[in-house]
Image (cartoon, rainbow, N blue to C red):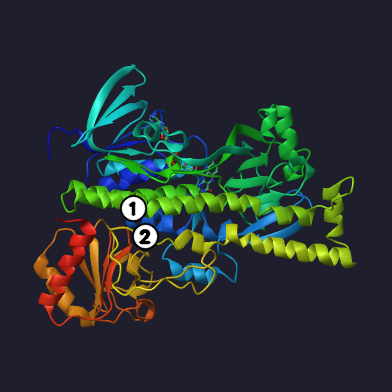
């Protein structure tokens, strides 16, 4: 390592993107320095829903159990409620985040990790603490000002805010994880396409014990169908459990053409009491804030030695809970590539695959999150009877009507709820990403993937190059269950084969590469006693896969090879192609 560089990677931002990048790089043994202009990490709960792919990132980085300790467990994420107020008559429930009887098996089968709910102001410190313990350097109260790049590195100008002192750090690479108003993006000449601030929501964080209203029907989201909060695309108020059941966020859409919402204590009290349905409710207002609905994404995430990720490149509303989840996966995709290039295992062109693989995901989730807001329209119609003086009251009354009008309204409600599965049970949206780039080697006679079920709702496990390695439970030497995902990752490329694929294992042993490990499924450390790997592997037992450190299948060979010499030739070719080794 040249002394010219004070760090290998400089990261701007300690949000989910920056903190995950730092944790992964530090775990892989890469020098990383992270700056944040604030005194500490996120000061409000913000993102919370952590989906299975993000959980797998935490698991690979060895912090899953620590994260779960502070999180609301999956079972409690449960029944999303639509009600007139917490105390008032309930209208509908939707079993969500895969916890319903009809979906729970899909979620259990797809990943070793159940979902959880961990607010961002708990997630970020956890990532930062572990990154620091593994050697990452963090500078808070440090503002990124500008950068200049040349052929060998990036010179980044920073300001130490308490003293005002400006100084420079020389790094090989710069990561812009500086959120939705990214200056790194602007300075690198990268752009987002779309619309910013197309709607707005008011948020109030408050402390009140609401156990009596919710403990018997646990959920993290309660929607209030009330004229006290009926503005905008969603047209409902929200009560979101932050610390069950004592800390909450109340949210409602407001008309931004009329300026900021009224956050006077009297108005906030009135609103929260109306949503809870308790005119006497005693509670403490912790903070108030406003956030805007964006619909924008960047077609290109990098410029030379500068790589952006997270909200810097995809900006969208929280509906579907895709924000921090996608940030963490951007980070996981980028970090191993940076590590492999810094360590000299891979050529620099490997880094080009970051945009190619992540930009389509960014575009997809921006669309999905905004569509999830628009998909409230049929629900709004089911709750409202147009042409009456009080459409909401008349609509809710009619939902109890025994006659044809009631029958029709209840049928419309059922249909409208079904549509919300695309927000609340969209396991396919969360898990079905496919990477297409030079860092994935297409099969010579590959045909287009055929989706057997709705790809937004249902996950489709496959070992096709570009997909994440399917999860299957195996049994290790100690008799405990171990996931296929536990045997790969950890910063290495994995050669995965079966007992009949000894030639591959022999070849890999002879190659003796520091970044390559061999996983023999069926061997003592990974017995396929449930035959579940057999069911999903889609290759012969003597075939082989190369799995990248982020768990994505890079290459697959259906059949066995004649001997270890042939195996070595094929492996060398595949690795050279994957890692751009000239
Ligand atoms: P983020 O904005 O978090 O961090 C940016 C970092 O850069 C900060 O540390 C900041 O201080 C730093 N920074 C910026 N400029 C700087 C400069 N010039 N110098 C130094 N530092 C600088 N997502 C999800 O997955 N599930 C969910 O349920 C929700 N819910 C949700 C609710 C609400 C109300 C909001 C507003 C958002 C969500 N989200 C969400 C979205 C989620 O919060 C968002 O996607 C992530 O915070 C984005 O993470 P980033 O790391 O990209 O940026």
Q: Check whether the beta carbons of the residues at disc 2 and disc 1 lie within 8 A of each other.
A: yes
In this view, the residue in front, 162 or 468, is: 468
Instruction: Please provide percent x and percent y for residue 417.
Output: 68, 61
Q: Secondary structure at mark 1?
A: helix
| Relative vertical location of residue 143 with respect to residue 366 in this rendering, above or below | above
Instruction: Please provide percent x and percent y for residue 182.
Output: 42, 34
Q: Secondary structure at mark 2?
A: loop
Residue 230 is drawn in which quadrant?
Answer: top right
Left or right side of 247 for 447: left
Residue behind label 1 places its C-beta within 8 angstroms of ligand 1:
no
Whether residue 117 is visible, yes or no, is: no
Whether residue 267 is visible, yes or no, is: yes
- Residue occupying the point 58% across, 49% down: 370
Residue 75 is drawn in which quadrant?
Answer: bottom right
Give the quadrant of the C terminus.
bottom left
In this view, the residue in front, 579 or 74, is: 579
Q: Which mark is residue 333?
A: 1
- Residue occupying the point 13% across, 71% down: 569
Residue behind label 2 places its C-beta within 8 angstroms of ligand 1:
no
| Relative vertical location of residue 168 with respect to residue 136 in this rendering, above or below | above
- Residue occupying the point 51% across, 63% down: 427
**Residue identified by numbered label 2:** 435
Label 2 Cα crowd, 10 Å radius (few <14 / some 14-19 / many 20+): many
Label 1 Cα crowd, 10 Å radius (few <14 / some 14-19 / many 20+): many
Q: Mark 2 vs mark 1: which is more N-terminal?
A: 1
Instruction: Please provide percent x and percent y for residue 108.
Output: 48, 69
């Amino acid at each position: 390592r040249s002394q010219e560089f004070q760090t290998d990677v400089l990261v701007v931002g300690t949000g989910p993107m920056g903190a995950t990048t730092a944790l992964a790089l530090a775990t892989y043994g890469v020098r990383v320095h992270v700056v944040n202009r604030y005194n500490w990490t996120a000061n409000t709960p913000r993102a919370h829903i952590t989906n299975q792919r993000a959980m797998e990132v935490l698991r690979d980085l060895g912090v899953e159990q620590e994260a779960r300790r502070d999180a609301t467990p999956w079972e409690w994420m449960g029944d999303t409620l639509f009600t007139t107020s917490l105390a008032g008559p309930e209208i509908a429930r939707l079993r969500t985040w895969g916890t319903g009887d009809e979906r729970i098996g899909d979620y259990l089968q797809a990943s070793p990790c159940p979902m959880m709910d961990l607010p961002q102001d708990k997630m970020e410190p956890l990532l930062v603490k572990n990154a620091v313990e593994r050697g990452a350097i963090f500078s808070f109260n440090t503002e990124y000002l500008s950068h200049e790049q040349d052929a060998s590195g990036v010179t980044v100008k920073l300001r130490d805010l308490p003293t005002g002192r400006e100084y420079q750090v020389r790094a090989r690479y710069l990561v812009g994880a500086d959120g939705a108003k990214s200056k790194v993006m602007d300075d690198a000449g990268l752009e987002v396409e779309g619309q910013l601030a197309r709607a707005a929501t008011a948020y109030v964080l408050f402390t009140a014990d609401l156990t009596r209203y919710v403990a018997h029907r646990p959920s993290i989201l309660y929607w209030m169908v009330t004229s006290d909060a009926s503005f905008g695309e969603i047209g409902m108020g929200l009560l979101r459990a932050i610390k069950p059941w004592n800390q909450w966020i109340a949210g409602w859409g407001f008309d931004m053409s009329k300026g900021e919402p009224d956050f006077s204590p009297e108005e906030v009290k009135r609103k929260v009491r109306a949503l809870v349905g308790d005119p006497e409710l005693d509670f403490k207002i912790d903070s108030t804030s406003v956030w805007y609905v964006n619909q924008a994404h960047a077609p290109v995430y990098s410029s030379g030695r500068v790589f952006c990720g997270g909200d810097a490149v995809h900006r969208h509303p929280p509906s579907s809970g895709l924000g921090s989840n996608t940030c963490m996966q951007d980070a996981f995709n980028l970090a191993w590539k940076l590590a492999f290039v810094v360590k000299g295992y891979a050529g620099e062109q490997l880094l080009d695959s970051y945009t190619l693989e992540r930009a389509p995901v960014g575009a997809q989730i921006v669309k999905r999150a905004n569509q999830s807001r628009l998909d409230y329209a049929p629900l709004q119609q089911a709750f409202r009877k147009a042409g009456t003086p009080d459409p909401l009251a008349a609509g809710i009354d009619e939902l109890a009507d025994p006659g044809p009008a009631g029958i029709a309204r209840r049928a419309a409600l059922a249909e409208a709820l079904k549509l919300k599965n695309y927000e609340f049970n969209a396991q396919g949206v969360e898990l079905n990403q496919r990477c297409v780039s030079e860092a994935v080697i297409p099969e010579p006679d590959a045909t287009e993937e055929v989706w057997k079920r709705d790809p937004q709702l249902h996950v489709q496990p496959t070992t096709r190059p570009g997909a994440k390695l399917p999860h299957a439970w195996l049994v290790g030497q100690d008799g405990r269950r171990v996931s296929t995902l536990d045997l790969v990752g950890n910063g290495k490329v994995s050669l995965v084969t079966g007992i009949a694929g000894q030639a591959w294992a022999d070849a890999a042993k002879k190659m003796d590469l520091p970044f390559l490990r061999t996983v023999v499924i069926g061997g003592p450390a990974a017995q396929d006693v449930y035959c579940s790997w057999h069911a999903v592997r889609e290759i012969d037992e003597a075939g082989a896969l190369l799995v990248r450190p982020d768990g994505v299948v890079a290459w697959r060979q259906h059949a066995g090879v004649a001997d270890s010499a042939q195996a070595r030739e094929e492996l060398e070719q595949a690795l050279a192609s994957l890692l751009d080794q000239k």
